[in-house]
Image (cartoon, rainbow, N blue to C red):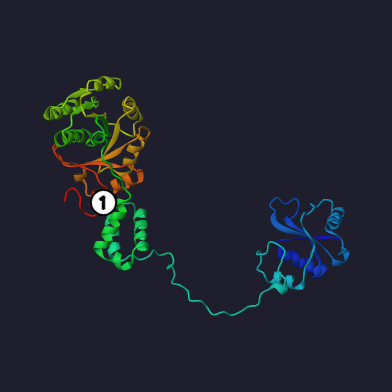
Amino acid sequence: MPKSYIAETMREALLMVQAELGPDAIVLSAREAPLGSPWNVWKRPGVEVVAMAPGELPVKESLPAAEETVKDVLPSREKVTGWQPRRITREEARLANQMPRGSQTDAPSVKASDTPKKVDLPAAPSAPAGKEDEPVELPPVLASLRRQLLAQEVDEAFVERTLQVMLQGQSVSLVSTPEVAHKTLARLLEAEVTHVVPASLQSERQVVCVVGMSGGGKTSTVARMAMDYRQRLGKKVAWVCADTLRTGAIGEARAYTDALDLPLRLVYTPQDLSTALAGLDDVDLVLIDTPGYNPYREQEIVELGSFLSELPERALYLVVPANMKEGDLFCMSGALNVFGLDGVIVTKLDETSTYGGVYNFVRKSHLPLAYFAFGKAASAGLEAATSQRLVAALFGKGWNQ
């Protein structure tokens, strides 16, 4: 006749089975069961084991028949599927008795014959604590270059990866030489940044829109580009001023165009653009100074977009000051991604000594560099951008040197 044994742990229940039915008792089922009286609200969790003496269950009886026998005897119990009755040996009971209280959650399944014998092996030498997690120590030359780049606020994870590439691709003796290490690292940094020849040099007539925030050097950059194309390249240039709402913007544009003897067109609405461009068929380059916009103000972005939508065939350059925070740089470019930026013009390079933010921005955004602008004089301070010049600034050769 099967009997039920309820205890706090599986080990205690098995000991109760062993004490009453002997070490060869057959366990029929095991499940969780609450402890305490039925009327007790705060019941503790426990274990219920149903077992029977070995002589009461035929050994040759198949599993379905055994399950049917249990169902007839205990109609209120749930039938255990996928279970086969198993004998508990004396060794298993002894092992269960040696386990600490509460650690046994199921019937023991280790046989005495399966228990491995203890073999004394020589202790392996252990590595010093924390040694495996430490990064590879850099040679002094690379460590110095690393400090320079981090001081320039170049992305630290990128710096670490680049230095590891150097260590894997070069021998320690080579990367320990200052000249070789500096040149190798500079080439790796330069490969991450692209620069382009401005699109206005590649066609007979080009419309170039310059966009950027107010106060970022947008208008002065347009003046420098106009002077460069007119005096150095001998091209006919026209200035279209769409930045007509800013105080003093029209007067500033007139002063530049009068000094350079350039035609000036004023545009107040997006619809005025087609009229302004219609009379400029004889010029080689049309520079459009767009209204300054705040990337955190949706209405200003919509207004700028209405101007750009009127010019489907144009080159679009984003003017970013070098002293702007990296997060703001990404916000400025992200607001204009839908219009397709062709390049970046970096201004105010002489007003900072840290160029890592600009480098991180152009590397991560994959926007090519077009121009570098610096200084106060509109007659100078514009140069075609190259990745070599920007990387040189990271190592101390800035625009104030």
Q: What is the number of callouts on the image?
A: 1
With respect to residue 279, does 15 lie above or below?
A: below
> Looking at the image, can residue 196 be seen?
yes
Image-quadrant location for residue 368: top left
- Nearest to the observer: residue 381 or residue 93: 381
Q: Give the residue at the far front of this rendering.
A: 204
* Residue shown at 66% from the left, 75% from the top: 116
Question: What x and y, as percent, mark residue 160?
Answer: 36, 57
Q: Give the residue at the far left of this rendering.
A: 259
> Looking at the image, can residue 35 be seen?
no
Left or right of 191: which side holds 77?
A: right
* Residue shown at 20% from the left, 24% from the top: 282
Callout 1 secondary element: helix
Question: What x and y, as percent, mark residue 94?
Answer: 72, 72
Disc 1 crowd rating (10 Å Cα; few below 14, some 14-19, many 20+) is: many
- Nearest to the observer: residue 348 or residue 382: 382
Left or right of 323: which side holds 62?
A: right
Question: What x and y, as percent, mark residue 172?
Answer: 32, 67
Left or right of 58: which side holds 207?
A: left
Question: What x and y, as percent, mark residue 101?
Answer: 66, 66
With respect to residue 18, does 186 lie above or below?
A: above
Mark 1 — residue? 391
Please name the amino acid that badge 1 sits on.
Answer: Val
With respect to residue 329, does 70 lie above or below?
A: below
* Residue shown at 68% from the left, 72% from the top: 98
* Residue shown at 70% from the left, 53% from the top: 43
Quadrant of the image containing the N terminus: bottom right
Image-quadrant location for residue 374: top left
Image-quadrant location for residue 291: top left
